[in-house]
Image (cartoon, rainbow, N blue to C red):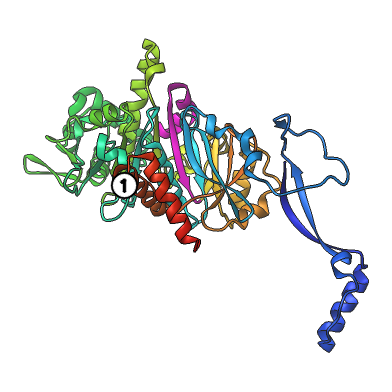
Amino acid sequence: MLQTYDLLYGSQLSQTNLELMSGMKLEQNSSLEFMDKELRNYTLVVAKNLMTVEQNRISKSLPNFFSDIRMLDEDDLKLLHSSNLKNPLFIGMLRSGSKIINYDLCIDGEKALAEHILISSSTGKGKSNLTSCILWSNLDKDYSGIIVLDPHDEYYGRNHLGLKDHPCNKIKNQVIYYSKNPIPGTISLKINLKAVKPSHLNGVISLTDAQHEALIAFHRKYQENWISAILKEEKIEGFHETTLIVIKRKLSNLLDVKFVGDSIICQGIFDITAGETTVNDICKEVEKNKTIIIDTSNISSGMEILVGSLISSEILNKYKRYKTQGLLRDKPVVSIVIEEAPRVLGKEVLEKGQNIFSTIAREGRKFKVGLIGITQLPSLIPRTILANMNTKIILGMEMGVERRAIIESASQDLSDDDKNIASLDKGEAIVTSNFLRFATPIKIPFFEDVIKKELNKKEFNHEMPNSDLKEKVIKQNFIGVNGG
């Protein structure tokens, strides 16, 4: 199996003669004909070896001179073994150039989600569409639960088709939706201030050493009421008054709370009375293989990261306890979807201190907790983090610096694919993963088409349970379409 990575012109005519004929045509606008033009001029295909198919192994030798070649067909794809996976996660249709092959490319979902997935492309190439397809594929599986921080409110389908329309959601309530502005059947997003700890603020707001130490001192003295104590300007020894005023201002702005008179006024999703069980409820549901979508479209970026930090910390700590107790094997993988991943995994952010997301990126796979990072700018993420994202789905990227960041950290050798990545059309991608034998080109279906196909299939199966009758209808439709 060979992969084409470049095309060149070839000719039996010398370069001098070709240039002479080109100049004559340009200057005289004459009609020039080649003698035996199909023989004398041709296109050269530059290819690299991928697999020795008969032996099902990476190829370490070249084909014989003058070997015949042909296009890939479905029978050649048995070596990918996607159909035999225990926990398949659909990521797209196999692609050969612009040709779509009737083969669903899947990877081992349980392993891939635990060892992190990176989705990277330029704007408008289909990152959100791909993420929606992955989440849809995962909904009816029992090996994983997913938490989605959704800053654009695009996955659930509040006003359009979305994950809420999956057939298994109608039966098992597999999608749980939290929002500041809930709709019927969904849950209001409220989190109690007592759930927040100083460690959750790492990577969320910028703090000096003195300010960070002040937060810890307040937490040590006032325990779960430490934020209320700061807002009420309770005194604590060893810190300058200016430091306390600054941390009060930063917390008030982040949490959208203020102290008026003798009361704390909560204007956002954080509250002093409601939301005491929200984080724990989310963790319980995701352990039941459910997909939790948190609509963060109406809150600030800092507040979104804080919500993600709270939930991610709780999940990781629970799964660490499960491993200590010998219970981890029976728990599903938990994956956390983060849009604009450099906000929490970027070099500048991590230079100010580690956060829960970088901790998960480094060691989460040991505890079955992974990330799905989505970004336009992979070059902003440290190479050590990129190297830990063991599955990368690369859509079209025009900027050379971003392509190089991905190529240098890929699971397979993509050194010849720089031009290929730059020229990918919308919905086309290359997948490089520890769970694939080689970097594989795919075409991602349009998400709404996936939904409509599934719903039509469900309706068809419901209305026609008799398999013989269904087969008869299919044949009739086929004959009608072809004019028979």
Which residue shows up at 36% across the image and 52% down it? 452
Q: Residue furthest bottom?
A: 28
Q: Residue at x 38, y 54 (%)?
A: 448
The image shows a total of numbered marks equal to: 1
- Whether residue 394 appears in this view of the structure is yes
* Span of residues in magenta: 353-376
For disc 1, the neighbor class at 10 Å (few under 14, some 14 to 19, many from 20) is: few
Q: Extreme top residue here?
A: 325
Q: Residue at x 88, y 72 (%)?
A: 18
41 w.r.t. 232: above or below: below
Could you tell me residue 388's position as x and y percent? Answer: 54, 32
From the image, tell me which residue sits under label 1: 459
x then y, percent, for residue 308: 33, 37
Q: Position of residue 242 (x, y in %)?
A: 26, 41
Is residue 205 left or right of 108 when viewed as pictured? left
In the orientation shown, which residue stands out farthest toward the left? 262
At a point 79% along the width and 60% down the height, the residue shown is 8
Q: Nearer the viewer, residue 244 or 112?
A: 112
Give 327 or 37, whichever is nearer the viewer: 37
**Mark 1 residue type:** Glu
Instruction: Specify whether residue 407 is painted magenta.
Output: no
Judge whether residue 364 is colored magenta: yes
Question: Taking 235 as reference, is 369 left or right?
Answer: right
